[in-house]
Amino acid sequence: MPFPDLPAPLARALAARGYAEPTAVQQAVLAPETAGRDLLVSAQTGSGKTVAFGLALAPELLGGSERVGPPRVPLALAIAPTRELALQVQAELAWLYAEAGARVVACVGGTDPRAERRALDLGAHIVVGTPGRLRDHLERGNLELTGLKAAVLDEADEMLDMGFRDELEAILDVTPQTRRTLLFSATIPKEIASLAKRYQRDALRIAATAEGGQHGDIAYKAVVVPPREGERALVNVLRWHDERAIVFCATRAAVNRLHGNLTERGFNAVALSGELTQAERNRALQALRDRRAQICVATDVAARGIDLPELGLVVHAELPRDRDTLQHRSGRTGRAGRKGLAVLLVPANRRREADRLLSAARIQAEWGPPPSAEQIRARDNERLVEQAIEAAGTATNEAEPMALGRRVLEAKGAEAVAAALLRALGAALPAPEEIEPPEPAAPRGPPQQRDRREGSGGEGAWFRLSVGRSQNADPRWLLPFLCRRGHVTRQEVGRIQVMERETRVEIAPWAAARFAAAARRHDADDENIHIAPMQAPEAPGARPLKRRPAPPPRR
């Protein structure tokens, strides 16, 4: 379906960018019944909503003409939660309204406020900014909003989550009540509904895409990894897919550590976190856009709303805190009709948590182990052969290079020359990691059913730890230690008997082999604590802990 009638400058701008037909959200906001009305729009990230509200603002900005008038006071204001998203919105609106003569000014944190004030003094038709910086310019008298005809709140749910409600209200309270207000949000929780009720008039509710649920252009994979092998698994995931990727971590410290480790391994990686200056963040994003970097390691906030063309892979190196974070992270790929892949690295002892997260987001994921080093080397061989054939096909036919090539062939032979070419092509590839084979998942169902399936009679396997009361052993720290060291869950740890010089631990029968294999491996952090199997104690010397009740069976 082609775009409806649009002002000629906007139609030409869309055609020049290759827009042949509108996306669902663009079609929805341009429908005849939306004309002049306030809009409350829910749309998935990557659905083309920046262009959508840019087109929706045309009546307020152009008023039926093909060009805007002189830039006196701003006619439209767009507010976004992060610097990157605000700058991205400015860039989109700038090309969309370039032929119409509109001047678009950005006001974001991390940049020189004096330069922004000078830009505002020269006049702007559209101002795009983050809540804190816009409020600052308002309070200093640099921003005049008395002539505002339209206001846009982009990713409003994220702005409220980030604590910007006071700033939003301070900005909207000084704008004309006659303005048109367009509110875009991935979800419409009660806080957004309350904001809309206060600042919108008879808003038309548009669900351009279903709230929640799985994005049709994003496939999901959940990769189960031993708790201490997440970084090795990440290396293999990145090597296997060989795509431009963004890797999400929960904290700035984790971003810095992981970025440094990936760089040391040979990946062309950049970091993106809130501690960087705006110039540093811009350089990191530009490195990804012009392909000088392949991997971006980022925190949730730093990567909010960024648009990286042809980003094929999102990796959740640390599990998201909730379903909205999962969807917003994953939404960096699968944009504008392109297919994308989101991979969750799931520690074996947090699989149940990941299951609940995916279920809450109504996402179906394919579960499996990380790619092995052997699989990656086999795929590398196929890719290197293809690259070598392609390189040979584009070789020059000039006399001197051909003569040199014949000399090399005569000296070493065709196979040796081809092998040297393949080695040279593969020299820059980061080495894949050796990862232990996947561990069997714990059977489902109540303990009695699981014990019968295992033929164990219900008793667990016992292990001895070389630490006791004399070394301050205590179940409060032993339990999380056992889960981490032995790759088990709390429900798979039974009785813990702390003796004077040792501790005896019961492990569920279905998890005993996994626990024993994990406990045998060297652990630099806990090398002084040794774990060994033992016979079940006949007369325990300490009062055992009560067995933790198993969770109810999943239905």
Image (spheres, grey):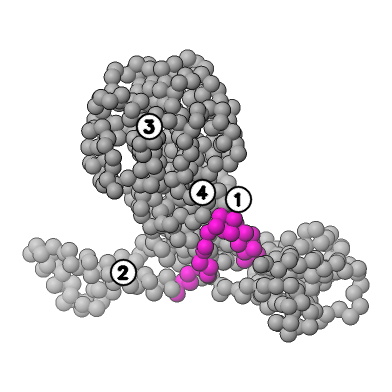
Q: Position of residue 506 (x, y in %)?
A: 79, 73
Circle 4: is it few (<14), some (14-19), or many (20+) Cα within 10 Å?
some
Q: Which mark is residue 211?
A: 4
Answer left or right for 196 relative to 421.
right
Camera-side residue: 459 or 67?
A: 67
Camera-side residue: 5 or 316?
A: 5
Residue stretch rendered in magenta on the structure: 348-374
Q: CA distance from mark 3 to mark 4?
A: 24 Å
Residue extending farthest left: 399
Residue at figure coordinates x 81%, y 81% from the top left: 535
Q: Secondary structure at mark 4?
A: loop
Q: Which mark is residue 461?
A: none
Q: Position of residue 228 (x, y in %)?
A: 61, 63
- Residue 304 sits above or below residue 472 on the image: above
Residue at figure coordinates x 48%, y 39% from the top left: 205
Residue type of the residue flagged with mark 3: Ala
The answer to whether residue 297 is seen in the rendering is no
Answer left or right for 425 relative to 334.
left
Q: Which mark is residue 35?
A: 3
Q: Nearer the viewer, mark 3 or mark 2?
A: 3
Circle 1: is it few (<14), some (14-19), or many (20+) Cα within 10 Å?
few
Q: CA distance from mark 4 to mark 1?
A: 18 Å
